[in-house]
Image (cartoon, rainbow, N blue to C red):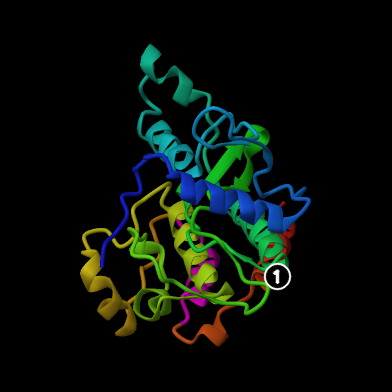
Amino acid sequence: MAAVNEDDDCPQNEASLQAEAQLFAAMGDNKHDHVVRLLGICSRQGPLWLIFEYARYGNFMRYLRDHRESEYHEEDCSSTSSRNHKMQFITAQKMFQFALQIASGMEYLISKKILHCDLAARNVLVFDNEVLKICDFGMAKDVKYHGYYFRQSKRMLPVKWMSPESMMDKLYTEASDVWSFGVLLWEIATLGGTPYPSVPPERLYDLLTSGYRMSCPLDCPRRLHDIMLLCWAADVNERPTFEALSQLFSKIVKETN
């Protein structure tokens, strides 16, 4: 079982881009605040191009890691760290706000019968005022007829973000996206850490099915880790829906304001 390199920025092939364009067409008029918008498609005299709205701060994984470096260099007054000095630290309250935005975007996608199938910090974009939008629908599927998807391709897979049923049975549902969301929460809490550090991808399935789960990261709010564990329930029926997660994080954000 192969693991995708989370730092890989290789361009998608044209077939993947066509599938992504068709998915946005099936989605209809996307105006959700936390899902990236497709502005246009260009196919004349060359390769296919999809034109999306511009995200000034790039992907969320890089954004989190930049903040990690900011905290590491907070005592460094050299000019090379001046950009990092301007960053605001990611507080517990901000972690919950980030989680709410992504859960809200996923709730919208599920309402449109879209499974993302590759939810991770690298596939979220950061806009002005720390607005987050879900992006990269290269693995996403329209499931309006069945509500689930069985993977048939043999492409490289992001194993460390996948649920056990997706690894073994190639089955994708809202519950498997919820599992991936739990891993994304762990990425937030660790400022862009790599999940299951030191665990080889080929050992991960047996480890997870034996009951192993990642422990609470240093300085992570206990409540946030509790929600991760809910997302990683072995029984898919015990995992919360994105609607429930949106409501839960909305309540927490209001309490912490």
Q: Is residue 119 left or right of residue 99?
A: left
Q: Is residue 104 left or right of residue 3?
A: right
Indicate the secondary structure of the residue bearing disc 1: helix
Above or below, comparing residue 202 to residue 42 in the picture = below
Magenta range: 220-233
Q: Is residue 18 visible?
A: yes
Judged by its main secondary structure, the magenta piece is helix
| Residue at x 71% of width, y 64% of height | 112
Residue that lies at the very extreme toward the top in this rendered image: 79
Above or below, comparing residue 133 to residue 141 in the picture = above
- In-front residue for pair 99/113: 113
| Residue at x 56% of width, y 77% of height | 148
Q: Label 1 belongs to which residue? A: 243
Task: Name the quarter where the N terminus is drawn.
Answer: bottom left
Mark 1 neighbour density, 10 Å: few (under 14) some (14–19) many (20 or more): some
Q: Is residue 106 left or right of residue 211?
A: right
